[in-house]
Image (cartoon, grey):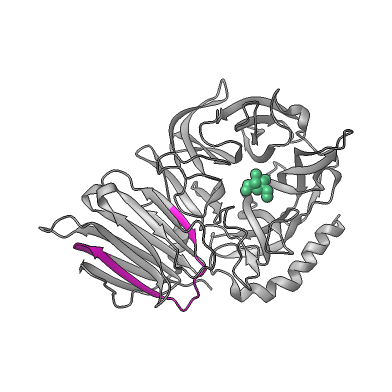
Amino acid sequence: MISEALQRARDFEKTHIPLVAEELPKFHVTGGVGWINDPNGFALYQGEYHLFYQYYPYETKWGPMHWGHVKTKDFIHWERIPAALAPDCAFDKDGCFSGGAVEMPDGRHLLMYTGVRTECRENGETETVQTQCIAIGDGVNYEKYAGNPVIGSEAVPEGGSTTDFRDPHIWREDGRYYVVVGNRPADGSGAILLYQSEDAIHWEFVSQLDACRNEYGKMWECPDFFPLDGQHVLLVSPQDMQAIGREFHPGNANVCILGTYDRERHQLLREHIQAIDYGLDFYAPQTLETMDGRRVMIGWMQNWETSGHVPAGQRFMGQMTIPRELTIRNGRLCQNPVRELEGCRGAKAAHQNVLVTGETSLEGVWGRFLDLTVTVRPEEGAELYRWFQIDVARDGERKTSIRFTPADCLICVDRTQSGLSWDMLHVREFPVSAGAESGQLKLQLILDQYSLEIFVNDGEQAASNVIYTPLEAQDICFSCGGAARVDVEQYVLEVD
Ligand code: FRU
C-alpha cells in the first residue's frame, strides 16, 4: 500500500527531477531535487548496492524526513528508484529518521529506521519520542510493519533518553539480526546500544557497546560497526563536539574507534581513536561489504552549520561523498576512492619532476571533473620549502586552495574565495601523519562539479569539501614558498 504522502513524493519526483538533472554533480549522489542528509540503508540487496537517504523532496531545506532511494552496481552510475518511505503512520508521523537495511533470508529487503513522533503530555508540554521501526519490501516498495515500533521506549536502558534514541544500523550474523542504535544515557552524552533478534521483530537489549562519557562530543548519532582487517571499527557522528587538538573539530564531528570486539561482554575495547574525515563537509557515514569482500563507506558531504545556505537558484541541496574503500594500515583507518572510479579515467596529462618555485601552471592540467595526483618532495640541496600550495577551480576571481606546511605537518583547505556569498566555515586545517615533516607528500584530488575530495598519502587521510564555484573556473595552479619538485598525473573523469 502506497500512502498518499508517499505517492505525493513520488509524483513530485517524476515531474521535478528531470528539470534539475543537468545541474547535478556527475558522479556524486544527490536527491535529484530537494534536500538530502544522511546516507541510509547502504547495503547489498540481490546483487546490487542500494542507498537510501534522509530526504525532503519539496524544498532545499530539511523538512519532515522521507527516505529517497537509488541503487548501483559500480558505485559510479546510480539508478533512481521512487522514494521508499514517507512519514505517514502514527509511529513516524514526524519523520522517518536514519537507519539501515539488510537482506532477509527469504530474499525480502528489510529497512530499519527511527520513527519520530511528538506527543502532547497532560501538563501541556510536548515531548519527542524516537523508536525503531521496520518496513519490508522488494527493493522498490516497502510496507511498514503494523506492529511498529519493534524497539520502543521501554527497551532503552535505565536513565537513557527516549527522545535521543535513533539511527539503527542493522546487520545479520550467525543467523541472527543485530542492531546498534545511538542513545543519550544519563550523563547527557552519547552511547551506542546493541540489540539482537531472531526475527527482526522481537528485540532484546544486549549491551552498551561503547559510550562517549562526555569525552568525544555529546549525543552519538549514526553508528556503524563492522570488522575490518582483524579489528573492529565503530563509526559515530557526535553532536556538540569540542575541538581536540587539530584532530577533531568542534560541532557535528565524526569519530572512528578501532578496537577489539569482546564477544562475551559485547563491548568494544578501544585501541585507537581518530577522525574519519578531515574536511569541511562530512557526516553520518555508513558502510557495506561488497560482493568481493571490500568494505565501502559513503558519507553525507555537507555539514549542518552551512547547510542552511543554498546558492541562489540551486534546486537541490546535499550530496554524498564518493564511495570509499576502507582498510586499516599502521593502526589507522585509511580510505581510497572505490577502484571503479578508475574506469572513468579519460584523457591523461602527466609531468615528472617539475621544479615549483613561484606560481606554476602545467600544460593540460586544468578542469573540473578530475582525478589528479600530485607528489611533492623538497628540491635537493635547497632549504626545505616553507609551504606548497595547489589552487583548483581557479579563475581571475575564484579559487579553492590546499596548502601544505611541512614544518608543522599541516594541510589547510581554504574555500573562502570559491564563489560563496556567505561567510562561515570555509577554512579547515588538519595534521598530516608522521613523515610529512621531510616535505614528502602525495595528494589525490577528486573534483566533481560541486566538490573537492582530498586523499592524503594513499588514503591515510581524506578531506571532503563542497565548493559551489561556477564551472568556468577551471585553472589549476601550483605555488611554493621556497622550492619543491612535483610529479603530476591527471585524468579527466568521464561518466556517461
Ligand atoms: C544526523 C541526524 C540523525 C537523524 C537525521 C534526521 O545528521 O540528525 O541523527 O536520524 O539526521 O534527518
Q: Residue shown at 84%/57% (left/top)?
A: 2
- Outermost residue toward the right in this view: 122
Quarter where residue 400 is shown: bottom left
Q: Is residue 232 left or right of residue 411?
A: right
Q: From the top left corner, tell me how far across and down residue 378 is, in percent.
A: 19, 57
Viewer-side residue, 110 vs 321: 321
Q: Residue shown at 42%/75% (left/top)?
A: 397
Q: Is residue 289 left or right of residue 7?
A: left
Viewer-side residue, 167 vs 233: 167
- Work out whether residue 436 can be spotted: no
- Work out whether residue 466 can be spotted: yes
Q: Is residue 263 above or below residue 43?
A: above
Queried whether the magenta region covers residue 250, the answer comes back as no
- Outermost residue toward the left in this view: 381
Q: Is residue 269 above or below residue 372?
A: above
Can you say which quadrant of the picture contains the C terminus? Answer: bottom right
Queried whether the magenta region covers residue 476, the answer comes back as yes
Span of residues in magenta: 463-487
Q: Is residue 49 above or below residue 184?
A: below
